[in-house]
């Protein structure tokens, strides 16, 4: 919302200036769009990742004097945490079910082996 309001303000004051992009002009001039590969996208190390906490959101909110940052940021963090927790629980349940199936299969195999060993003794 804030971004849209800022753009409207720039448009009203005729302060929005468009500049040609030589890179985009080259891309649009191509007959077929370029394809990106994984090598074209530099992957940063984990030290370059932006990890936000609620405390950091409070500081950012205070710095920009905007309480919406704090409120919306906390909501986003809560939603992401809930979603990630749900995915972790799903993975744990799947792993537990697989483990139980493996144990049951192993017990079945050991019972078959014991039965086949006992049959010749009779």
Image (tube, grey):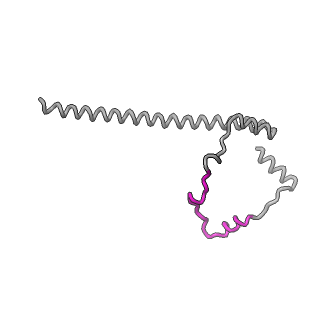
User: In terms of depth relative to the viewer, which is nearer, 27 or 14?
Assistant: 27
Q: Is residue 102 above or below residue 31?
A: above
> Quarter-wise, where is residue 95 in the image?
top left
Q: Position of residue 110 (x, y in %)?
A: 26, 33
Q: Is residue 82 left or right of 60 when viewed as pictured?
A: left
Q: Quadrant of the N terminus?
A: top right
The residue lying at 62 percent from left, 70 percent from top is 31
The quadrant in which residue 97 appears is top left
Q: Write the residue at 64% across / 34% down.
A: 78
Between 37 and 76, the one lying in front of the other is: 37
| 42 in the magenta segment | yes
Question: Toward the viewer: 112 or 29?
Answer: 112
Please give the name of the residue rendered at 65% of the width and 37% of the height, measured from the top-left corner: 77
User: Per the image, is 89 magenta?
Assistant: no
Note whether 56 is above or below 9 in the view shown: above
In the rendered image, the residue lying farthest to the top is 122
In the rendered structure, which segment of residues is drawn in magenta? Answer: 21-44
Tell me: residue 122, above or below residue 52.
above
Residue 5 rendering spot, x and y as whole percentages:
80, 46
Left or right, 105 with reference to 77:
left
Q: Position of residue 76 (x, y in %)?
A: 67, 38
The image quadrant of residue 17 is bottom right
As drawn, the residue found furthest toward the right would be: 13
Number of labelled discs?
0
């Amino acid at each position: 919302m804030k971004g849209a309001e800022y753009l409207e303000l720039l448009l009203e004051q005729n302060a929005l200036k468009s500049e040609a992009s030589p890179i985009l002009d080259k891309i649009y001039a191509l007959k077929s769009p370029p394809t990106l590969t994984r090598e074209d996208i530099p992957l940063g190390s984990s030290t370059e990742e932006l990890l936000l906490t609620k405390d950091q959101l409070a500081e950012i909110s205070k710095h920009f004097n905007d309480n919406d940052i704090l409120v919306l940021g906390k909501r986003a963090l809560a939603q992401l945490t809930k979603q990630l927790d749900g995915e972790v629980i799903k993975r744990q349940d799947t792993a537990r079910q697989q483990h139980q199936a493996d144990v049951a299969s192993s017990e079945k195999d050991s019972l078959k082996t014991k039965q086949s060993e006992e049959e010749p003794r009779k």
